[in-house]
Amino acid sequence: MSVTPVDPHDITVRSNGLRRRRIVEKGFGVVAILAALMACAILAVVLGTVIYKGFSQLSLSFFTEPRPLFGEQGGIADALVGSALIVGMAMLMAIPVAVLVAIYMSEYAGPRVSRALRVVLDVLNGVPAIVVGIFVFGILVVGHGQSAVYGAFALAILMLPMVSRATQEILDVVPQSLRHASLALGVTKWRTTLSIVLPAAIGGILTGVVIAVARVAGETAPLLFTTSVAANTVSLDVHGALPTLPVLIYENSESPDPNAQAAGWAAALVLIVFVLLLNVLAKFFAGRKRRKLEGS
Amino acid sequence: MTSAPFEPTATPELDLRRRGIRLGDVLFKGIAIVAALAAVVLLAFIAWKILDLARPAISHFGLSFIWTDVWDPVKEEFGALAFIYGTVVTSVIALVLATPLSIAIALFLTEIAPRRIAAPIATMVELLAAIPSVVLGLWGIIVFGPWVRDHLEPWLQGVLGFLPIFSGDPSQVGILPAALVLTIMIVPITSAICRELFLRVPRDLVDGSLALGSTRWEAIRGVMFAYAAPGIAAAVLLGLGRAFGEAIAVNQTIGNRNVIPTSWFEPGNSLGSMIAAQYTGATSVLQAGSILYLAAILMVISLVANVAAQLIVVRFERARRAV
């Protein structure tokens, strides 16, 4: 280490130590490659473990039979039905409101209001899922008991900001010329929005919806307080608590019984395949959206 | 209306239709405004309701709840310190590990890898983000935890055993496994944001730096980091918010012991994990209130992290627009 002060802006001084610079340059490349490899390796290890431990459990009866009461072989039909109903109801609750919020932001509100709403949605998106669960527990479950509808409501709260932000971002890139052409033909603003702007943006909206569904389908925390104490039977009664895949995996993961753990791995495999398929679907929609908007 | 002199073509039907049409516009705009208001009210209602539900415990314990380290349902004495400690320590470890890793991944994807390799790897990182936390927790408790106990923790103890945080018996559940599972959860989030940021750095700035004779790393450090620094800070805060709020995967791996552990190998507990563990029902009003007090603390610290991230983004965008 030299004691003479070095001017950091003097290029000639900096270009000394070429060897050191070359080593740093090489080292940076190696570190970046290793980091990327590590992320891929972790994904491979997690997916590999789930497939390895879960695949052998899968059979037709695993999908058609409800969970066993004690120890015997059984399936996850009750949780599959419960999860499908709850996620379906959450979509019905969240998507119309979310799309309307996005329409207000991009078609009606001024830039300042729109920016404020964006911050509100992002903050809502940042509320921890477990806090949303406890909130729904506090306003609905206390006094009424657990119910699949309340679970769906909690998931809808999580979906709302995700779908709204995705929709608003795609509405903002729909060309103004489309709106102007429609309005110039004498079409009213609301008809223009519904039959010209939304169809033009449908690819992006679907991408947002699919990603939001993939996110909430695996959420456990909001369901624990709203629809976790349920019977192991296939039921369509949404007013009572219904079993769900994530809660089943959660409970089985903490069970010392190897049969329960094995069923947990198989359920995890089903959930992961579903979530990954949704992500592939989202990519497909996103690709279509891009082609369509670039084409116009 | 029918006698309007300037509109000779305005027949009664046309006028009505025009008014009907306007009604549709007003109605639609009204519905959209109501939906937007509902989103704002929902956020305010969540915040108010959580504080309201926690009121019995807030009025009983006051603010000292936050720095009291006790959880004793028998004596009805409750405090949040052990859970705040668990939340902050696991999240900070996760962040310290995840931030350089995420930046390195983002740099690999934008600066090093040819596009044909970068695209599939970016997809894989996205898929890592898509794995449900409960599945990651299942893997954490059954596969990863034992590996940490048998390999990682003995190695850490051998190298850094003189530090109290690496003392004691290795364990498959504890602060360290939970922090590592959180790291896996936030790396894909922060690396995706960093990648977007790096892609938005104007290419001519980087090229200018390279043309002046800097190495690629020097261009990245001097130009890209300088340009993207506020965005990276926001990404880190968003990751921190996610780590604070994660309940399930932490619950499965942290061990759920309501004390402040000296060693990272020992089990502890976090705010979210403690709340999740109580879903089968608290036994007294005060205990239920205390759980909600924990939820209120969790809500406040994750909102602070998120709002701080938003403010950075807003200021960042304003500065960019000014340029």
Image: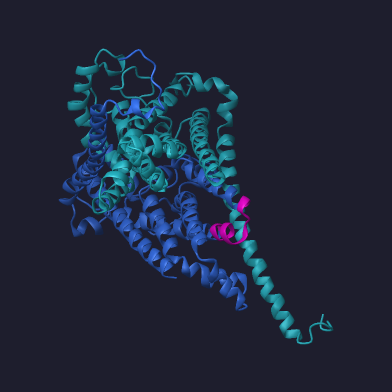
Chain colours: A blue, B cyan
Give the quarter of the image for residue B69: top left
Q: State the extent of the magenta-drawn residues as a range.
A: A101-113
Residue pictured at 48% horizontal, 18% vertical: B68
Q: Quadrant of residue B255?
A: top left
Q: Nearer the viewer, residue B75 or B87?
A: B87
Q: Report the magenta stretch's main SS.
A: helix
Residue A186 seen from this side: yes
Residue placed at 19% from the left, 21% from the top?
A: B154
Q: Depth check: B88 or A4 in front?
A: A4
Please report the residue visible at 17 percent of the width from the left and 51 percent of the height from the top: A55
Which corner quadrant holds the C terminus of chain A?
bottom left
Residue A30 position, x and y percent, is 22, 36
**Residue situated furthest front in the rendering:** A12
| A177 to A60, vertically: above or below | below
Whether the magenta-drawn stretch holds residue A108 is answered as yes
Q: Whole-percent x and y of residue A194?
A: 54, 70
Task: Give the tally of numbered discs.
Answer: 0
Image spot of residue B270 (x, y percent): 40, 29
Q: Is residue B66 left or right of residue B150?
A: right
- In this rendering, is residue A78 above or below B97? below
Image quarter for residue A78?
Answer: bottom left
Of B203 and B28, the residue lying toward us: B203
Residue A239: image location, x then y, percent = 46, 55
Q: Quadrant of the N terminus of chain A?
A: top left
Q: Is residue B109 magenta?
A: no
Report whether A75 appears left or right of A150: left
